[in-house]
Amino acid sequence: MSSEREIALNARAWPFEEARKLLQRIGDRMPEKGYVLFQTGYGPSGLPHIGTFGEVVRTTMVRNAFARISDVPAKLFAFSDDMDGLRRVPDNIPNKEMVAQHLGKPLTSIPDPFGTHESFGHHNNARLRDFLDRFGFQYDFQSATECYRSGRFDAALLQVLAHYDEVKNIILPTLGNERRETYSPFLPICQRTGRVLQAPVVETNADAGTIVYRDEDGSLVETPVTGGRCKLQWKADWAMRWYALDVDYEMSGKDLIDSVRLSSRICRTLGGRPPETFTYELFLDEKGEKISKSKGNGLTVEEWLRYAPEESLSLFMFQKPRTAKRLYFDVIPRAVDEYRTWVAKAAEQRDDRAALLENPAWHIHDGAIPEAETDLSYSMLLNLAAVANAHEPAVLWGFISRYAPDATPATAPMLDRLVRYAINYYRDFVEPQKQYRAPSEQERAAIVDLRERLATAGQGADAEALQNIVYEVGKAHGFANLRDWFKALYEVLLGQSQGPRMGSFIALYGVEETIGLIDRALAGEAGAT
């Protein structure tokens, strides 16, 4: 039998493909720094968002895959660009007037509007770390301010200064005519105002390690580029960071393809080697438009986690990262049930390691896949919540305990979580949209027939037998397309155009309860419990 490493070296799942790129990069040598370095970047002018989660979880999946094919240690740096100058006051903070007085300053030089940390940047960095810790990510936090001011970047900054014209000429062709006149890779920090300046650089002195720039008042100022007295424009900054830290791997979105290309050229100009990169597609909203924080379209992590477990969000991020995907509320139930399906499939793959390493659940749980609990799907729980008008978990557990007597909140914790998520989803999305309709004459006759056959079947009938009864009734009453029959059941009985596999639903809800549901619908009392 092949070892897991041999199997992993041939695994087709995209994290293993990326991990093999890293293995080829380092070859047989140990990196001088003693580890392979993964990096994710974060702009701390706002709160962590769903894109932050996606980038870190995907990078972590590659890191975990790399650990299966190499003994070289690996680290993940979560890098905060907290020395950037604040360009506008965010809408979602207190004390906006106070913050407005510090526009243009590095985030770590602006007082914290929340009053909890030494600066606005420190506050948002703490939120980032809390966010990453919440999901159990393993990372080393890195602050741009600390790296610049401590001298950690000094040697790399001097290298940029030594190649000033070359770096500048890489960027200039991408700029408009007006911007070309004043562009410099270096942004001096004004010692009078503390602001990050977009100032023209009129002279460079590589030997002295300084630049001379024209200040806002028109005077010429000479300043070192080291020690936090300057920072770099972001494409040059990204390249310098790759060079200074010897970054081996970094992901970025499709919108940064040109930036990756330019930063890679700059990194090589400095004498470094750009990292292996991976470009992922951007998320779209339900209209197919790009998700934007400023627009507020799409989903937040908090919204997803109100309706589904984080594992389902990890699956959404794992699947087809190079394909644009719509990210809105309707995708959540499907993601949950797909996650459950992969977990159940993993149990069948225990003796087939090659298949198991292709299973998304393996990558979500780094190989420690939990046991599947029951065959109850999230979609089924949503439909049960809709029929029972459930606002409390105990209502759903009353039905579940009869369908799966061995399942309890203690023995099936994931199922208990899904029950609570289903209630939230029902209350927020399903309940406000429920619209019942009266059946047509054909549909009424078929539903009456269904009632009679269910009464004959009795409470002990299993899901498959009940499904066959539903099928037979539809055929017997002349539904040329059985989809129309099922749609009628959903709209008349459940108040929605889509619904569950009816046999499984009846088995869960109960035959007698379903008969009562039919009676209420035929009496024009649909939705009453």
Image (cartoon, helix red, strand yellow):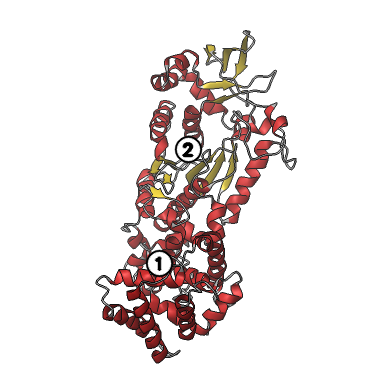
Nearer-N-terminus badge (2/1): 2
Q: Determine the secondary structure under disc 1.
A: helix
Relative to 522, 230 lies left or right:
right
Classed neighbour count for the residue bearing mark 2: other residues with Cα under 10 Å, few (<14), some (14–19), many (≥20): some
Q: Which residue corresponds to the image point at 54% horizontal and 52% vertical from the top-left? A: 301
Q: Please tell me whether mark 2 or mark 1 is closer to you in this view.
A: 1
Q: Residue at x 29, y 72 (%)?
A: 482
Residue 1: x, y in percent?
31, 70
* Residue 174 on image: x %, y %: 40, 22
* 336, 515: nearer the viewer: 515
The answer to whether any part of residue 362 appears in the image is no
Q: Amino acid at mark 1?
A: Trp
Percent position of residue 226, x then y: 60, 24
Quadrant of the image occupied by residue 496: bottom left
Q: Report which residue position mark 2 lands on.
A: 246
Residue 76 versus residue 5 in the image, above or below: above
Q: Nearer the viewer, residue 151 or 304?
A: 304
- Extreme left residue here? 480
Give, as a three-letter code, the residue at label 2: Asp
Q: How many numbered tags mark residues here?
A: 2
Disc 2 is placed on an element classified as: loop
C-alpha distance separating marks 2 and 1: 37 Å
Q: Which mark is residue 342?
A: 1
Residue 92 in the image: x percent, y percent? 64, 40
Q: Is residue 297 above or below residue 214?
A: below
Q: Quadrant of the C terminus?
A: bottom right
Residue 155 seen from this side: yes
Please give left or right for residue 55 compared with residue 129 in the image: left
Which numbered marker is on residue 251? none
